[in-house]
Amino acid sequence: MEFKALREVPAPAGFKRGDVMVVFGELFQRGYANGIVDEAEKAGMTVVRSTVGRRESDGSLRALTSEELQSWPKPYINVPLEAGFDMEPANDGTTPVDQLKSVKMQEWDQVKLDWTKINESRANGTKRFKKFVTEYMTQLMPLIPKGANVVFVHTMAGGVPRAKILMPTMNKVFKGTGDRFIESEKFWKSELGRLSEASFEEVTANTFQHLLELSSPVREQVEKNGGKVSYVAYGYHGTEVMIRGEYVWQTYPPYLQGWAKMRLEALAKDAWKKGIKTQVFNCPEILTNSTTIFLGVEVSLYPLLAALRKEGTNAARTKEIFSESKTLLKDEHTLEELLKVSDEYLSSPVVKPFIDFKNWPKHSGKEQMELLLGTSEKLIGMHKDEKALITYLLSEQIFRATGEVMFREAWTPTAPVLWLGHDVLAKVLTQTSSKAH
């Protein structure tokens, strides 16, 4: 794997009113895709929104109701794009989640699944997803004016099977200490881990492949009419942050979705070789509605303050962010102290063996996780309010800056896989018009 970081802010994009951005997946609050959507709307583009649908009490998947649709801006394609197969019936009508209904916590590592049925569910889920994507593309075609340029934004990620046993087990993997700690490798090699791996791959990676293949009629029509088509997707493969005064690649271990993210990268590279402008952007970690299980993931967010100071000490945006950050800390703590604590974790000899680019992703270790969780707790404890963290403020800066970089890069794509470190994002925040909302 070649590490290719984007070091400078790309030139402004040439997208204009009449061009179209297609959000492939549902747009949720505090998610990464909000940043690039904001950029598209500033440029006057038409943003086509989508839904993953909703599940009824009997488990069936449906589109949104007219009442649910009322709050969404138009145009909106109401075709349920939920990916994965955890609730997809096998040929006998049972789902993977059904197989796990009676499993107790103390039995998590003794589970034996019926993989014939799971593979049937996986095949059925893929068939259902591709059917709906085909319908989606049919509805999309009339929404694209002749001569328009189109950007597809792939937002699908995750895929934790919705079985009750999974969350308490994963809580011990990602938050457990002492006797409550479960090694991520032990979990990954269990039946629950195997199921999670397959689900992550289907949701995070294979949906991108289906998008590329099933949007080919749209792509051909747009290009025939003189427009151009590009695809962007959100990856994570570690990122560079300021450690001991230098930008250094680091990662959050254990990142169990890493294998699926690597497949996502491979799919982008394959498509690029075929002349399709696909890009996976490996972004820094942020706090979103879906990252609450990963306690400690926010530790590498704090160094963005150091990057802002390096790239634009006197910039108005830097001063605003520092000023707002200070107000969130208890009076007896300083931002320098905060940065020192995160820096000590990221540069610790305990952590170093787990931060290995060539062998990413790596599983967790007990001492490493205890240090991570202890550091996270210490940093959170410096704040006045645990619900008003500096990392929420910094997360918003990152997803907005990331959106601006991706939007610019999508106009003239330079590579299928790019890393966005704190350096280029700090440059965006301090040198361009990005503002917090």
Image: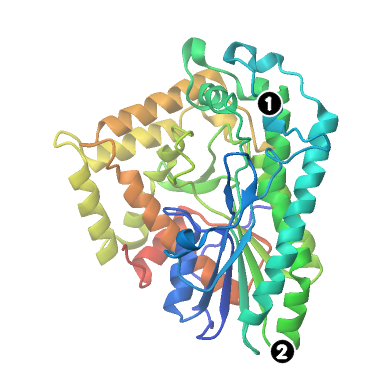
Q: Nearer the viewer, residue 235 or 424?
A: 235
**What residue is rendered at 76% in x and 58% in y?**
130
Near mark 1 (Cα within 10 A), the count class, few <14, some 14-19 or many ≥20, is many
Secondary structure type for disc 1: helix
Between discs 2 and 1, the one toward the N terminus: 1
Q: Amino acid at mark 2?
A: Asn
The colour scheme used here is rainbow
User: Where the C terminus falls, by quadrant?
Assistant: bottom left
Give the labeled residue for mark 2.
225
Q: Nearer the viewer, residue 186 or 369?
A: 186
Give the labeled residue for mark 1.
192
Residue 150 in the image: state x and y as whole percent: 62, 77
Looking at the rendered structure, the number of numbered marks drawn on it comes to 2
**What residue is rendered at 56% in x and 62% in y?**
6
Q: Amino acid at mark 1?
A: Leu
Task: Indicate left or right for 324 with 360 as reference.
Answer: left
Q: Nearer the viewer, residue 231 or 98?
A: 98
Residue 56 in the image: state x and y as whole percent: 58, 44
Query: Is residue 275 visible in this depiction of the protein?
Result: yes
Tell me: residue 428, above or below residue 291: below
**What residue is rendered at 79% in x and 46% in y?**
124
Tell me: residue 102, above or below residue 393: above
Which quadrant of the figure has residue 352?
A: top right
Q: Nearer the viewer, residue 229 or 144?
A: 144
Task: Indicate left or right for 401 with 145 as reference.
Answer: left
